[in-house]
Image (cartoon, grey):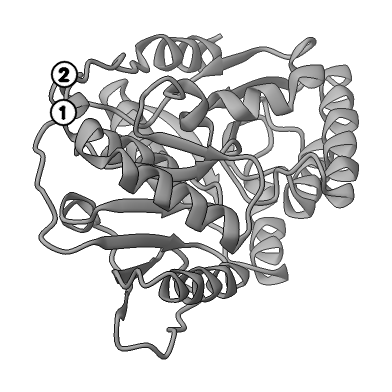
Amino acid sequence: MRKLFLIHSDCELIIDYLKNDLITEGYFYEELVFERGFKGLLEFVKYSDRIHNSNLLICQSISFKLIVMLIINILVKPRRVVFIIPPSVKHSVKNIVFKIEKYLFKTLTTLMRFINIKQLLVFTTPYERILLENIIRKTRFTYYPTYFAEKPCVSEFVDSEKLTILFFVKEPFELHLVSETISILEEISLKPLVLINYLNKYFFECIDDYRVVCIHQYDYDELIKYSTIIITKTPSPESNSIILKSILYGKPIITSFENGLAIYYRDVDFINIQSSWSSELIVNTILKILSSIDELKKKSLSLNIDILNNSFGKYVIKEFLEE
């Protein structure tokens, strides 16, 4: 069997799909899951002496952590490196820190090519590919979607008995946005049941309101199925999965351009992309959805979406590792 070092942080959903493909192709892997902060980097430093002249797969957002990992790679010289770039809140073109990190990533990957470390960039949504357009011109890359629909149509539609708005929260700053949105809805005499599901295992805080229910659940199919409107702002592997599940249950979803699956399915009537976020804009979009909710229910019955396939991406990764 062939061996691969698998190193990742906040990539569990993507890595779970990849593991199945690696095992199918006859690989066995040694895995290191990064913790947050410098403790994770220290673990990688201890680990680094074992990756010389080996195959390495890293799933990590463009960040300071990845830059440090690249520097270590240059020093220890693995044979090949597969970089999986997951959806992340850090990937913002408006963020000056990200622009610096992106420039450093480009510089260090160029240096890695110069010292003959082979590289493959892997994207799971179109957004990351657009984001790194100036880097992939000189680097091999492929698309490996990890969000699949078994059927191209709505699998099951359940009409909510009560107006229910389901917020998926990844970062602490989103909670204030949710609270303001609820206040404005109350001002216009709209009092839905609000569910807040946390996607961040390091953060859990609730709003003090009897109509708000806070939960921390990773299997969110049932939550989506019985909700009226879904809202997920911050990009992550989980939020892209939520977009697809919302489409397949015929539920309108409010999301952002940075969630790359929203770009791919932007022509689906259920997708509402917010170019900017404020409580007022969210309420306006909610009202717009509610005004056409019966029409959206009818359209869900005739939905026919493209089904993503990762066969080609899997083939490219396999060929790269076996060169």
Tell me the distance, in whole angstroms, between the alpha carbons under discs 2 and 1.
Answer: 7 Å
Which residue sits at x=69%, y=49%?
49
Q: Position of residue 61 (x, y in %)?
A: 65, 45
Q: Which quadrant of the view contains residue 39?
A: bottom right
Nearer the observer, 312 or 181: 181
* Residue at far front of view: 188
Q: Position of residue 249 (x, y in %)?
A: 19, 39
Q: Amino acid at mark 2?
A: Ser
The residue tagged 1 is: 298
Is 109 placed above or below 170 here?
above
Which residue sits at x=28%, y=66%?
217
Nearer the observer, 223 or 133: 223
> Does residue 275 appear in the picture of this structure?
yes
Is 160 placed above or below 308 here?
below
Q: Amino acid at mark 1?
A: Lys
Q: What kind of element bears circle 1?
A: helix
Instruction: Give the left or right position of residue 104, taking residue 291 as reference.
Output: right
The residue tagged 2 is: 302
